[in-house]
Structure formats: structure tokens, C-alpha cells
Amino acid sequence: MPPGPTRDARHRIKAAALHSFAAKGFHATTTRDIAAAAGMSPAAVYVHHASKESLLHALSLEGHAEVLRLAQEAVATGETPTEQLRALVHAWVLTHAERHTVSRIVNYELDALTPEHLAEVGDLRRQITDVFRSVVEAGVASGEFETDQPRMTVTALISLGVDVARWWSDDGSWTAQAVADHFTTLALRLVRPGHA
């Protein structure tokens, strides 16, 4: 099969898997559901992915790699820990709102991955945590941030964005930008008590 059609087929399958997992959950979704959503036969799906778990793995790797890159780029825009955390949390929350479907699946269906695949995704998650931790630790070291529990604070900051994907609705009364703005203010208050 030529490269163009192959890439198109893979994209259709991943998009179909994403839609199916979001609608029914990973465990209730069958390969036939994914094939039907992609407008393909189950056999055609197996040409590209050996199982629905391999599709979840691919989606999880891509999703986590994307937010890791986004986090690193956000931090690079700031000179001080405060500027870095402001940019990081804003980008983090915004992307989890705007890409809530894939974010929800790759964060809340992890238990369905094989141990080997979970370890791969876990490595990316640790790298993401390291980005947050380095900013918080730098802020504490410089005196910009105040927290006697930096690791717990990092967990709280990460949760601010991840949990948005769980409850976000495109039909809600808040815009993604408004939520990102407000959550960034909340994040800064976590590490700078008494400051805006």
C-alpha cells in the first residue's frame, strides 16, 4: 500500500478508536466497533494494530509525548520560576480542556495497558512530572515559592490540568481560555501564599 493511503488508514483507525473509547470506554469497545467507526473491516484494522490495546498504547504514547513537548516549550518561555510556572500551568490546563477527549482516555484508561506498554507511558509521565518538579524546586530555592511539600504540590499542579479533561464539556459555560487563566492564578497561589 502506498505511504499516503497507509498513513490515512492509520489516522482513521486511531480517530475511530478515540471516538469509540470515549463513547463506550476501553473495555466495552470491540475491534468491530473501531472498524465500523473507521469505515473499514476488522481485518483491515488488524493490518495496522494487533489489538485494541495496541491502539490505546499508540494513543497514550502520542498524547503523553505531545504534552511533554508542550510543557518543555512552555517552561522555555519564562526566565524566572514564576514566569515558567505561569506559562506551564496555563498551557497544561488549556490543552487538557481543548483536547479533553484524548486527554481523558490516555489518563484514565492506563490500567488497560500491558505492563510493558504501561512502563513506556510511565516513563513519559515521569518526564512530565520532572518538568513540573524542576520549576517548583527552582522557585523554592530562589525564594519565589513557599512550600514545605514540593512533591505534593507538584501532584496538585499536575492534577489541576488532568482533572479538567474528566469534567470538561464543550457545551459548558466556561471557555478553555477562562479556565486556564483562573487555574493559573490558583496554581500561583499554591506556591506563593498571599500573592495573586
Image (cartoon, grey):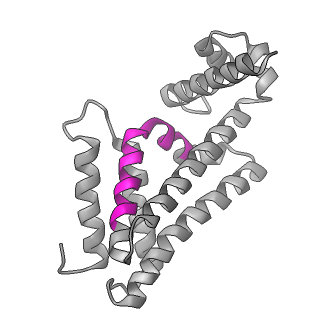
- Judged by its main secondary structure, the magenta piece is helix
Q: Position of residue 66 (x, y in %)?
A: 55, 48
Q: Position of residue 43 (x, y in %)?
A: 79, 14
- 88 or 56, which is in the foreground? 88
Question: Is residue 143 a member of the stretch shown in magenta?
Answer: no
Quadrant assignment, res 120: bottom right
Q: Is residue 57 left or right of residue 44?
A: left
- 121 or 180, which is in the foreground? 180
Q: Is residue 39 above or below residue 185?
A: above
Q: Is residue 131 above or below residue 124?
A: below
Q: Position of residue 99 (x, y in %)?
A: 43, 39
Q: Which residues are magenta?
A: 86-106
Q: Is residue 29 above or below residue 86?
A: above
Q: Is residue 103 left or right of residue 125?
A: left
Image quadrant holding the N terminus, namely top right
**Residue found at x 58% / y 50%:** 64
Quadrant assignment, res 145: bottom left
Q: Position of residue 12 (x, y in %)?
A: 62, 20
Image quadrant holding the C terminus, namely bottom left
